[in-house]
Image (tube, helix red, strand yellow):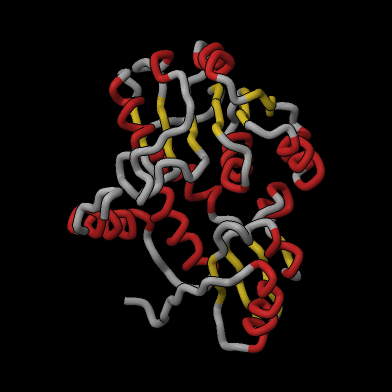
Amino acid sequence: DLPMSYHAFSIAPEQLGNFVHAVRLLPVAGFNVTAPHKRAIVAYCDEKSPAVEAIGASNCVLNRDGRLAAHNTDVAGFLWGLEQAGFSPAGKRALILGAGGAARAVAYALSRAGAASLAVASRSARRKEEWQKESPALLAAGKIQFVPWREEVLAELLRNAELVVQCTPVGTWPRSGQTVAFPFSALNEGHLVYDLVYNPPETAFLRRAGAEGARTQNGLAMLAAQAAEALRIWGFTVDEMETYRLLQELVNTAPQKTEAD
């Protein structure tokens, strides 16, 4: 047990500034941030980690006597998940599905880990412009290529890619039967397919990828490592594997729900 309490708050975008002001005045060690605030929160912080500088998004904030430092634990969490899957990204080619804040963190992590090339599939042309404006350092290395999200384009990229990362929330409970448009038949045992969604543990996307022989990894290990990294940032000592095992136990003992529930 840790000497702390953790609470969830639903903050409307127009109230984010008021929330941050309150945190500065209260004895709060820090807080996590999720969509839709990951990019907006950065402007309210006094300091930014190198990852936040590059990505332009934060999911973890440290409060030191009213001064706020923005961090991004998606990076460490994602790489730890890859490690648990037995995959080294060095020299490998990856296909990233989605171009939001999570995709930026994945691209940054893979670039730092030595990936040879990254193809980012997006349905919106403005996403590339957003990355150029908000994350120019991420694009500076020249490893990232933006591609249209069309199945024939993705199928061609899969001929050489070893890693596929699904960075959208599609397939998350309660809409766990949904999946993104994807050329599953182009997958084989040479691919690792990593879905950042962790609820349900096996998404429809992973199920279909596994049926084609691909190795699969869900987002639970990433969640565990994110949590451990955030707690360390806030001054606590935690172990990723211990956190991962606890989350696995919770998932395995939780009542199984369907979309009809």
* Residue for point 66% across, 72% down: 16
Note whether 171 is above or below 74 in the view shown. Answer: above
Note whether 115 is above or below 13 in the view shown. Answer: above
| Left or right of residue 205, residue 43 in this image | right
Q: Residue furthest right?
A: 133
* Residue for point 30% across, 31% down: 207
Figure quadrant of the C terminus: bottom left
| Left or right of residue 30, residue 202 in this image | left
| Left or right of residue 218, residue 113 in this image | right
* Residue for point 61% across, 58% down: 36
* Residue for point 79% across, 41% down: 136
The percent coordinates of residue 97 (x first, y second) are 55, 32
Whether residue 137 is visible to the viewer of this picture, yes or no, is no
The percent coordinates of residue 217 (x first, y second) are 36, 36
The percent coordinates of residue 157 (x first, y second) are 56, 16
Q: Residue 115 lies in what quarter of the image?
A: top right
The percent coordinates of residue 98 (x first, y second) are 58, 36
Q: Between residue 157 and residue 183, name the one nearer to us.
A: 183
Q: Residue furthest front?
A: 260
